[in-house]
Structure formats: C-alpha cells, structure tokens
C-alpha cells in the first residue's frame, strides 16, 4: 500500500518514527488492542475548521457561533467578531496550560514545605540553590538554620499563588531591560492565580471584546506561568531532589526488562515518583520480586514524570507521550502509575488486554477502570511501597511479552547551572565560553526545541529533522519534554551526534565532550531556558536583553495547551517561536497577523507557524542571523576559519 503523505513535506503520517513501536502497535492491533494509531486511521474524529482556527465560540448558550472573518455578516449572536473570539480562545488555551503548570507548582510547593519541616521523606539536597532562592525571595539567611530558611522560602513561594497585588519575586530575575518592557506594556503579573481568574473573567461572554486587550492579559498570564509558577516549581524541586547534572541513561521501549517487574511512572509530578525511585532499591521489595520469580524491579518513566527521573537519577524513559499505549502493549508492564497531565484515557482500556494495573494517584485525575491510590506528601515512601508491592503481585499473571529491542543511549540532566560547568570547567564555571563561542561564530545561536509529539505526523521525525537542520547550521539545541525524548530515540543526545553538527558547533562539542543537543528537562523546565537566556545576557557581549540574543524556539509537534502558554511566555520574553502544522488563531487573520508581526514591537518576540520541518529550522536560523546582524557579530561568522591557534585556544 502506498504511504500517505502528510502536509508536512517528507514526513508520512500518522505513526511513530520508531520501527519497534510501529511493529508492536501493528501486532497488538491484530489482537484487538486499539491505540491512537488505529483511532487516527479510523478517522472517527474530523477536526472542525472553526474550532481549529479558533473562531468557534461556545462561551454562552446562544452558541456555538461559528464565525468566518471575511464575511461581514458572520458574527456571533452577541456581535462578537472573529478576532475577539480567536483571541478569547487563544487566551483560554494559555489559561488552561498555565493552570496545569500552576497547580502542579502549588503541589510542589506544599511538598517542599512538608520536606522543610521534616514531615516527609525528603530533605534539602541543594543548599547552594536554597541560598540563591532565598536571595530572590528577600529572605535573610545570616545566622539562620537551613530548616528555617527553607520553611520561609516555602511559605513565601506559597503566598505567590494567592497574591493579588505587588508582583512576583521570581519575575525580578529577568534582565532589567525585560522588566522595563513588561512594565511599559502593562503586563507585569500581580500574582499567580489572579491572572488566571482575570483571564477567565475577561473571556466570559460580554466582558473584554478588544482582541489586543485580551492578548495583553494572555501575556501577563503567560509570564506568571514561566517566570512565576514554573520557575518556582523547577527551583524548589531542585532544592528538594537535587539539581540535575549530566548523566548517562537510555530511552525507548527496549528499556523495559523481560526478567524484571516493570513499573512505569507516567504524568508530571516527581514527588511520588522520587519516592518510587527510592523504594525500588529496598532489599525487602527486591526480595519479594525474587520470590515471584523476577530478577529485580525495573522502574521506567513516560512523559514528564519520566523526564524528571531521567534528569536526576538516569532512570530510563520507556516512551514519550505518543508511545504511552504502546509501552503497555509490550505486555511487560505490571503497573503504570499515573499522576497528572498528558495521560490518555485509553491507557485503562489498553491495560484491560493485559495483566497491567493502572494506578491513579492524584485526586485531580481519576480514570474509570483504574485503581486509585491517593498520594499525600506526608506518606510518600509508604504509598510508594504499597504500589511496588502490588506490581510485584501482578508479575506471575504476565502473559505473552513482546519488548522491541529498540533502545538508545542518551546523556541528559543539563540544568542552566551545568551549562556553566561543561563549557567553563569546574574552576571557571561561567557562561563566558558560551557567549564567546556565539560571538566568534563557532556557535551561530541557540535553538530551543520543545513540546509534545503529534498524532498527525510521523511523530519524532519532525522534531529530529528540525534539530538536525539546526545543528548542521551550528545552532546549539536545548531540548525539553517529549521533543527531547524524540531526540534521544534518534541518538541526538549523545556526544557522538556532534558528527552531524556544522564545523563550528562540532569543534565546541568535541572540545568539551558534550552532545550538540542538550536535554534540559520536562516541559516545566522550560523556565530553565529563561534563566539560561538571562545568564547569557548577564555574561555580556550579546546585548542587554533576551530579545537581542541570537536564539529562537520551536514546538514542531505541539499538542498541549501547556505548550501554548510556554510559547507565549517565550514570545513575551523576547524570543521567536515557531509552531508546527497548525496555529490556534488561524481562523482570524487579524489576530494571527498581530501575533506574527505587530507583537514584536511590544515585546521583541513573535510567533510563526511552519509545515516543513527544514523550513521551520530555516525560519529560526534566519531569525538568529537577524539578531547576529543587529549585534554586529554576523561578520565574524562569515570569516570563521579554523586554524591550529583557534583549536588550541578551545
Ligand atoms: Fe455566540 Fe457571543 Fe455567546 Fe460566543 S458569547 S457563543 S459569540 S453569542
Ligand atoms: Ni510536555 Fe507535551 Fe510531552 Fe505532555 S509531557 S506531551 S505537554 S511535551
């Protein structure tokens, strides 16, 4: 049968760019196991054009009002125009995505307070970061105990969520010029939750009907996510669990172990999964696993939770978002423990064909057919032990097992701090070498490749095509989320991938032994990219604001509302962001043109959409070159020649 071609040139759809996954999905389907691949093939769902372009409003019972922008009579019953509706929907997507980050950050903060008070199994792992964050939050440290400082930090962080006026501490970490831009535009967040509340109010029927004014609040909300909630969560997790440092691990289905009890943690909250990682090594549980005939316990991750464990412990990632059902189709999973976000409801259905138990753990996220074992901060190890014991009990019930051998080595665990060390060395840790290499043109710029896997393309291929094009053109890539897992499957997170890089980036990577694609963490960890960008600015020589540095972002296979919030806080921070395949305001040229052009005058950042992955990368490169030109460093790149003296200098 001839392969169908997707609108993404050179990428056939749908499916996964992993032979093992595709083969397994096919075999499973023959036995009646339905995954998203069959659901896509059945085409039971057809995207509605109005919904897709953002011009369908169902914010009151008069609707749905489906509006065509160019038809003058096509307006909502209330008179709402296409631009108003598209902006309202876009802003509600930001609110949805930002809320997901915020609610998770709130949970992390509560967990942090429990840890600080010694009421949970966790302690303070990174005292250096505790002091750094105490400084951000204006907390006195002199003569005080770690416990006191940590409790005050937790409580002050908690107060940020309900704060109504006065602004957020962590927003002050942005370069001064950036803060002035936000002040002038009137988008400095006043608190975290207030911005969501106001966004939902403004998008309610009959409130804000000016698309630019709506987008202003959307921007303020996105900043409250990236520079507020997400950043707070990332930093508190680092203090509690340790700041990631480069670590070797592996990814893909082959990380499941036929001889061991396989437990998959899936979702986004690392608090329970950290406890799982601790207890899986306990001799009593290992002995129990042996008793049922297994050779041990194999903990692996999927999605964000998986990424968190990968970053800190080198625990393998068995699959990205799009592989979650296929991981179960191996028949080798005793328990899949899910918490929040990016969990397909279908996992419970797929599990029915096997001996697998799906365990939900968050009161916020239950699934019919799953077992619910609620997590609480004060009993993390006991709950984790209970879950592991249940998984062990399931092991003897295993039927036919089919684990594809596909597995790839990766180096993960790059935090914004570790970029200091890898490039600067332990003794002169700083961003200076990175900045110098950008200025001298060995590194053309920095590209952030983030976000989900798409069901509409050969998933993974779009990310890796963008990434390969970027590194071939000397752009250093920072990857997060499922985009990073896709890079991992393709071998791009290994130092050997430097072979695929342009001559300048290759030299830098080989000199320090780093991969040309740095795994920065989960979606929440995109806040690390904000700090890395700020550090580049602070180091000097590349302008005095994030909008001046040669950098761009891309979410080539985006799916989740969280990525709309992330993209928008990147844009609000002065970056250029390309979305792949589809853009949520495409039904309104007025709003789309504003986001693709005019918004640059306000924040220095802007949006774009692309369909061909190579072209998406080229759009980023053109933006990077434009920034180099403005800084007056593009000339250096044109003249770059590598002689022995330059090699020695590196
Ligand atoms: Fe239609 Fe206006 Fe109601 Fe939206 S708010 S559904 S556009 S009448
Ligand atoms: Ni983040 Fe996207 Fe993966 Fe979910 S885990 S699917 S938001 S990138």
Image (cartoon, rainbow, N blue to C red):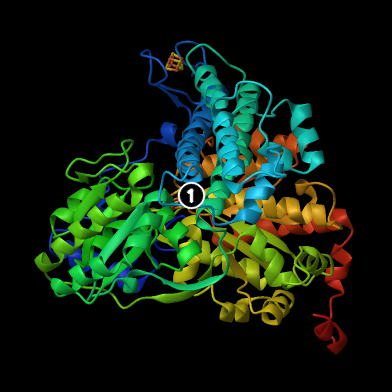
> Is 236 drawn above or below residue 10 in the view shown?
above
Q: Quadrant of the N terminus?
A: bottom left
Does the closest atom of ligand 2 sit within 8 Å of the Cβ of label 1? yes
In the rendered image, which quarter is residue 465 located in?
bottom right
In the rendered image, which quarter is residue 354 located in?
bottom left
Kindly identify which residue carries mark 1.
558
Residue 289 coordinates in the image, percent (x, y): 20, 70
| SS class, disc 1 | loop
Q: Residue at x 69, y 29 (%)?
A: 188
In the rendered image, which quarter is residue 320 located in?
bottom left
Residue 144 coordinates in the image, percent (x, y): 66, 43
Query: In the rendered view, does 230 fall on the left or right side of 104?
Result: right
Query: In the rendered view, does 457 fall on the left or right side of 425?
Result: left
Give the farthest residue toward the front: 143
Residue 631 coordinates in the image, percent (x, y): 87, 55
Front residue (pair 531, 517): 531
Say whether residue 14 is visible. Answer: no
Query: In the rendered view, does 136 fall on the left or right side of 123?
Result: right
Front residue (pair 49, 331): 331
Q: Residue at x 12, y 63 (%)?
A: 31
């Amino acid at each position: 049968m001839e392969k169908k071609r997707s609108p993404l040139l050179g990428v056939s759809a749908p499916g996964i760019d992993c032979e093992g996954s595709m083969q397994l999905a096919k075999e499973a389907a023959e036995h009646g196991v339905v995954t998203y691949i069959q659901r896509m093939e059945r085409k039971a769902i057809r995207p509605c054009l109005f919904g897709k372009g953002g011009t369908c409003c169902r914010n009151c019972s008069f609707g749905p009002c489906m509006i065509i922008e160019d038809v003058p009579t096509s307006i909502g019953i209330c008179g709402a125009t296409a631009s108003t509706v598209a902006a309202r929907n876009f802003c509600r997507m930001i609110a949805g995505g930002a809320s997901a980050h915020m609610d998770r950050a709130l949970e992390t903060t509560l967990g942090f307070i429990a840890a600080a008070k010694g009421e949970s199994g966790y302690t303070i792992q990174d005292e250096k970061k505790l002091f750094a964050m105490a400084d951000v939050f204006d907390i006195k440290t002199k003569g005080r105990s770690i416990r006191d400082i940590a409790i005050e930090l937790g409580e002050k962080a908690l107060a940020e969520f309900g704060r109504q006026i006065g602004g957020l501490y962590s927003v002050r970490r942005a370069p001064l010029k950036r803060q002035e831009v936000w002040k002038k535009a009137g988008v400095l967040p006043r608190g975290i939750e207030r911005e969501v509340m106001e966004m939902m109010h403004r998008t309610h029927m009959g409130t804000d009907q000016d698309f630019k004014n709506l987008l202003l609040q959307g921007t303020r909300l996105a900043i409250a996510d990236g520079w507020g909630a997400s950043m707070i969560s990332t930093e508190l997790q680092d203090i509690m669990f340790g700041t990631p440092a480069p670590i070797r691990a592996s990814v893909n289905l082959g990380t499941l172990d036929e001889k061991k009890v396989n437990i998959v943690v899936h979702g986004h909250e690392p608090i329970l999964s950290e406890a799982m990682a601790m207890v899986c090594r306990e001799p009593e549980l290992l002995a129990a696993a042996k008793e049922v005939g297994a050779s041990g316990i194999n903990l692996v991750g999927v999605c964000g939770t998986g990424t968190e464990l990968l970053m800190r412990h080198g625990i393998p990632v068995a699959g990205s978002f799009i592989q979650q059902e296929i991981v179960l189709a191996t028949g080798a999973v005793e328990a899949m423990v899910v918490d929040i976000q990016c969990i397909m409801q279908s996992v419970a259905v797929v599990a029915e064909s096997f001996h697998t138990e799906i365990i939900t753990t968050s009161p916020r996220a239950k699934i019919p057919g799953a077992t619910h074992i609620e997590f609480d901060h004060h009993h993390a190890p006991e709950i984790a032990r209970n879950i592991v014991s249940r998984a062990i009990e399931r092991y003897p019930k295993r039927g036919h097992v089919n684990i594809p051998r596909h597995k790839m080595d990766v180096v993960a665990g790059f935090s914004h701090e570790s970029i200091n060390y890898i490039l600067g060395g332990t003794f002169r840790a700083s961003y200076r070498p990175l900045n110098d290499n950008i200025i001298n043109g060995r590194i053309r710029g920095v590209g952030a490749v983030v976000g989900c896997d798409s069901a509409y393309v050969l998933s993974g291929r779009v990310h890796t095509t963008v990434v390969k094009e970027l590194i071939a053109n000397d752009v250093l890539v920072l990857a997060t989320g499922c985009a990073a897992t896709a890079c991992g499957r393709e071998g791009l997170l290994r130092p050997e991938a430097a072979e695929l890089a342009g001559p300048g980036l290759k030299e830098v990577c080989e000199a320090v032994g780093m991969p040309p694609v740095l795994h920065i963490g989960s979606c929440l960890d995109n806040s690390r990219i904000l700090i890395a960008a700020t550090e580049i600015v602070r180091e000097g020589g590349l302008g005095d604001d994030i909008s001046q540095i040669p950098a761009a972002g891309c979410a080539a296979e985006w799916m989740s509302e969280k990525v709309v919030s992330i993209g928008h806080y990147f844009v609000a921070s002065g970056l250029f962001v390309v979305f792949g395949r589809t853009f949520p305001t495409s039904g309104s040229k007025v709003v789309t043109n504003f986001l693709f052009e005019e918004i640059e005058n306000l924040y220095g950042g802007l949006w774009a959409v692309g369909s061909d992955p190579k072209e998406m990368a080229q759009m980023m490169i053109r933006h990077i070159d434009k920034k180099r030109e403005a800084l007056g460093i593009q000339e250096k790149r044109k003249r770059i020649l590598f002689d022995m003296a330059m090699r020695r200098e590196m």
